[in-house]
Amino acid sequence: MDNKNDFQANNDPLGEYLGVTLLEVREGYAVASMEVKPELLNVHGLTHGAAIFALADVAFGAASNSHGPSALALETHISFTKSTRVGEILQATARLENLTRKTGLYRMEVVDSSGQMVAIAEGRVIRKA
């Protein structure tokens, strides 16, 4: 990928809307961050799981599309391990675990600003020819 910001601006309008920033993208790897704002909270005043998932998904999309062929998610799974609140800066890292001609398997970890695990996810993509 030539420009990490091109991926965000041109291919992930939701990520841009949520304030997700791609910090690094290289083949099979991506890091994204997001500040938790009041509009990203759930009814308990904690970061909404959908916002955390969206952050992980942006990193997943960037990492899985960094190989050349378009990649589309087939399935994902996420487990939440810690709650966060307004003002927290979350960071998601997506790493390639296994790549075949047709599929890719990625692991995503979301951490808070102190490095504590907030969520862990796994996703599989289909790679278009």
Image (cartoon, rainbow, N blue to C red):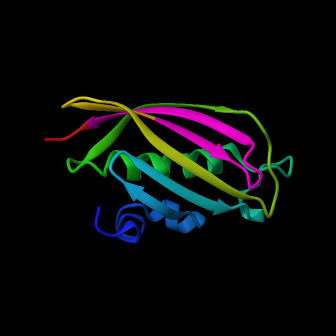
Number of numbered discs visible in the structure rendering? 0
Residue 43 appears left or right of 2: right
Q: Which residues are magenta?
A: 107-126
From this view, report whether residue 121 is shown above or below residue 18. Answer: above
Front position in the image: 118 or 128: 118
Q: Position of residue 23 (x, y in %)?
A: 51, 63
From this view, report whether residue 25 is shown above or below residue 29. Answer: below
The quadrant holding residue 33 is bottom right
From this view, report whether residue 118 is shown above or below residue 97. Answer: below
Residue 94 appears left or right of 89: left
Q: Main secondary structure of the magenta part?
A: strand
- Quick check: is 112 in the magenta stretch? yes
Q: Position of residue 10 (x, y in %)?
A: 35, 68
Q: Residue furthest left?
A: 129
The quadrant holding residue 40 is bottom right
Write the residue at 74% across / 55% down: 113
From this view, report whether residue 112 is shown above or below residue 36. Answer: above
Q: Position of residue 55 (x, y in %)?
A: 57, 52
Q: Position of residue 96 (x, y in %)?
A: 39, 37
Quarter occupied by the C terminus:
top left
Write the residue at 59% across / 44% down: 53
- Quick check: is 96 in the magenta stretch? no
Residue 83 appears left or right of 129: right
Q: Residue furthest right?
A: 44
Write the residue at 62% across / 54% down: 91
Write the residue at 81% across / 49% down: 46
Quarter occupied by the N terminus:
bottom left
